[in-house]
Amino acid sequence: MSGMPELFGSMVFNDAVMKKRLPHDTYKRFKKIIAEGHGLDRETADVVANAMKDWALEKGVTHYTHWFQPMTGVTAEKHEAFISPKGDEVIMEFSGKELIKGEPDASSFPSGGLRATFEARGYTAWDPTSYAFIKDGTLCIPTAFCSYTGDVLDKKTPLLRSMEALSAQALRILKLFGNTQVKKVTTTVGPEQEYFLIDKAMYDRRPDLVYTGRTLFGARPPKGQELDDHYFGAIKERVLAFMKDLDEELWKLGVLAKTEHNEVAPAQHELAPVFSTTNIATDHNQLTMEMMKKLAAHHGMVCLLHEKPFAGVNGSGKHNNWSMSTDTGLNLLEPGKSPAENAQFLLFLVAVIAAVDKHQDLLRISVASAGNDHRLGANEAPPAIVSMFLGDELSGILSAIESGVSYDKKEKVEMNIGVDILPRFAKDTTDRNRTSPFAFTGNKFEFRMLGSTFSISGPNIVLNTIVADELEKFADKLEKAEDFGAELNALIRETIRAHKRIVFNGNNYAPEWVTEAEKRGLLNWKSAAEALPHLATPENIALFARHGVFTEIELKSRQEILLENYVKVLHIEALTMLDMAGRDILPAILKYTARLADGVETKTALGIPCEADKAVAVKLGGLSTDILKGKEALEAAVAEADKIECPKARAMAYREKVFAAMETLRASVDAAEPLVDARVWPYPSYGEMLFSVQ
């Protein structure tokens, strides 16, 4: 595309724009404030705000908004015009005060008890580490969100806190290795985003998709993903046009959209960006999901981001590629040419291993949701058991260190696939493992358990904090060492021995792994209802408080929000099922059964054989009874669960009683669908939806 350098970031008030528009002294002062993490003074804020406003006005913008990420899982914005009265006229103004602070209503967002309905005041505060941008003709200023009492109500603030905590502890480790040039360590993330695209006309006729994002009923089509012909297949013209528009809009916003392809399931696709710092990557992923939904509509399609919109085919995840980098450009998880001799790399590696082993609970909780319950453990996603894949080479190195023997380095093998004209290339020293929840992939860890709708902030808050905690323990020990080398070697060896149970390089889908994991003492919480009650344990409260990421009240509020959300999602799904079954599905089946019965009567009178008619009518009659009973059972389960006041007990009741009743009702409906004339069935079928976009 011609003009690509001009297009990229054209809607972002980025460093290049600031350098051009801000006075030199202001620009230097602002950059220093960002680099050193100091608060922004009013004088600097006023100059930046005025330059930002002028830049936005030149692009036709009339409004600004503080763009923030409350605990709803989506972004929020309240638009304000630049206009200010001046006599009978108006002028366009934007002050440093307006840039720095906003005041949205805090009582209408999830707070987990931190805010009462009558306690409405909340604040948004500009995050200067994330560039302002123009979206939908509005200047968007990325901000943090807190209550009047200072408790955080968003996903960004604790993420920034966790990044600072990890940086502080990583710097202590680097200093021990003689690296005093590094001033900051930043975690980086590249989140891969999976999604489905279906025709909007089909979507509009499915109340379950409209209300819940997933199909609550639907018989499997004759063809699904069995032939593996969709994966990496030629992208359909309509989808390709959508992807082209999506790339351009994301590039304008400075999002490094890089890779796009068809995924395994029909109608499923993936987009992957280039790595960026974790807070920027989080902002960009929220924008990516928003743009996917918006631009799909422009092409007569709907983007489905639910983890499991269709039963029986692969669901959608979000692979969180996480690493640590210094401000001097060093990736701390880069093994180098001789990882066995790279003590600094090995220390950071075993810190991650220890963190994942000790805090399996938090990593599992960070990906727990009603939607992800449908996906985890199926043959498309890792199981609910947290484990790590390191590959043959790193596992061999750690085993040698543990045993106190020299590592026999593997030489690179040249690949020869038997065709002389094809180029030869070096084979990697280890394979990849797509079944592992937490896999080392060269110079980063790929956390594969995230659901496709997730904000990546939660899992990365956990990752940053638990690794910071291990680095702190390592630094405390090594800083007191009389013989640094000896203490370092002993620490690495001890850590390997203590936490090697978390490393598993085999098939995570194998039934044998469940048994083996139990023997190793690894957790296996199969549902969010089982996992979420363990978030605010005394140990976890102490961990987050120790690093200044969450206070006790903030962590407990999040547990309450997550449990409440879990119940609400299942409640809405149950009511939607009852509505669809009662108003559309059962009447359609009864009507068709009556038609068959009338036909039987007519054919019998004429002496025409009608055994098939009778058989189908009898079967549908039985299924109609099952559906009615299933509907009544689901109504009773919902009513019973809603009587429970304890959030943990209510969530478990919804999982064990309500969800079970939903599955029973669905089974009866799905059995009836193939027996009913397609012209009578009230909703588009799976086959129609999955293969509708041509």
Image (cartoon, rainbow, N blue to C red):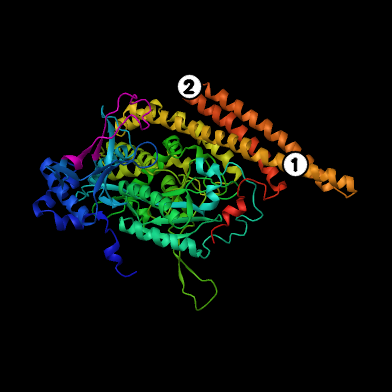
- Label 2: few (<14), some (14–19) or many (≥20) C-alpha neighbours in 10 Å: few
Q: Nearer the viewer, residue 632 or 391?
A: 632
Q: How many marks?
A: 2
Q: Mark on residue 593? A: 1
For residue 149: magenta?
Answer: no
Q: Nearer the viewer, residue 231 or 288?
A: 288
In front: mark 2 or mark 1? 1
Q: Nearer the viewer, residue 512 or 201?
A: 201
Residue positioned 48% across, 62% down in the render? 238
> SS class of the residue under badge 1?
helix
Report the residue marked by disc 2: 646
Residue 228, by quadrant, is bottom right
Q: Quadrant of the N terminus?
A: bottom left
Q: Is residue 414 visible?
A: yes
Image: magenta residue range: 97-125
Q: Amino acid at mark 1?
A: Thr
Q: Position of residue 483 (x, y in %)?
A: 26, 42
Mark earlier in primary sequence (2, 1): 1
Residue 425, by quadrant, is bottom left
Q: Position of residue 612 (x, y in %)?
A: 82, 48
